[in-house]
Image (cartoon, helix red, strand yellow):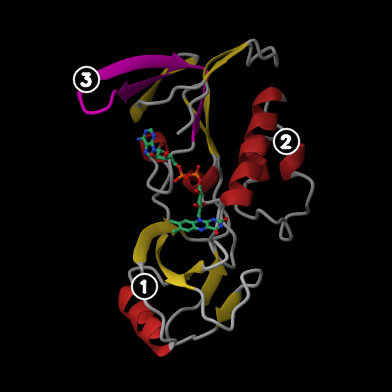
Amino acid sequence: MSFLSSFEGWQNREVSRATVLSGQRFVSCKPNGKKIHFYVSGNGDGERVEKTANVLVGADCALTRVAQSAGWPKLSMVPLVQAIVELPKDMPSDVCRIWFIPEDTPYFYWLIPQSPTHGVLGLIGKEGQEIQGHLEHFLQKKSLEPIEFQNAHVAKYTRWIPNHRKIGESNVYLVGDAAGHVKVTTVGGLVTGFRGALGVTEAILNGGSSNEFHLYPQGCSPMPQVDPQGFG
Ligand SMILES: Cc1cc2nc3c(=O)[nH]c(=O)nc-3n(C[C@H](O)[C@H](O)[C@H](O)COP(=O)(O)OP(=O)(O)OC[C@H]3O[C@@H](n4cnc5c(N)ncnc54)[C@H](O)[C@@H]3O)c2cc1C
């Protein structure tokens, strides 16, 4: 998770100091005049420490506490499951394979090599859907033996989610999965997450505006979930 705290010079559009806190868990935040107060806890000791910032950036995954504490609605989530498998004998390690099976998933099954000999085979399901069984059945059908399963709930693409809010007089931004910056096709968020981070950085440095989010007309942006209005 990233916090930009103690961002002195925000009002003057100058950056003189930014602090990234790591190894601490964000708990909650509240307004306090021109500043934002937030609490973090160290690993396991349960003790809360109060901190202050002018701008708070939450990059704390789709289950984001920053968004929750700042009043954003919960993100829609979808289940993802994949298995590490040995690549089929007829599959070169420089190609990916996908299968469309709409009865199982509105997305697709993928098999992506991760080394010359092994790959990951997986799928994303609908909200609330149980997909482990589908994957196991598909593996059987393809005569592939799972070496290890990996699963997670990831942010679902739902178009428009503003990623900026005011708490009192302070600005709170979300980036990455916390902001729902994921692709519509695969709900992957690595590239879109970095673009969102760049956009938020620009917005902070430019007093609210970001070229990154104004490059593309609304409706055909490669990152359609960012609300350019939020930066204006
Ligand atoms: C199995 C799997 C495969 C994937 N494959 C792809 C792919 O091929 N391509 C792609 O683009 N995307 C993929 N994704 C999605 C991609 O991993 C995410 O979009 C990306 O990691 C999001 O980055 P992030 O920094 O926003 O969040 P995360 O990577 O989730 O990082 C959030 C961080 O915040 C920390 N955190 C959480 N709560 C708190 C708190 N309260 N206080 C402090 N810190 C906190 C977490 O410990 C974590 O370190 C995949 C996801 C999964 C699960």
**Circle 1 — which element?**
loop
Residue 47 - label: 3
- Point 43% across, 71% down: residue: 85
Q: Nearer the viewer, residue 78 or 11?
A: 78
Q: Is residue 156 above or below residue 93?
A: above
Callout 3, which amino acid? Glu
Give the CA separation, mark 2 to mark 1. Answer: 45 Å
Magenta stretch in the rendered image: 37-58
Q: Nearer the viewer, residue 162 or 124?
A: 124
Q: Nearer the viewer, residue 34 or 52?
A: 52
Residue 174 - label: none
Left or right of residue 216, residue 128 in this image: left
Residue 130 in view in this figure: no
**Circle 2 — which element?**
loop
Q: Is mark 3 within 8 Å of ligand 1?
A: no
Judge whether residue 54 is colored magenta: yes
- Point 27% across, 27% down: residue: 43
Give the CA separation, mark 3 to mark 2. Answer: 37 Å
Callout 1, which amino acid? Pro
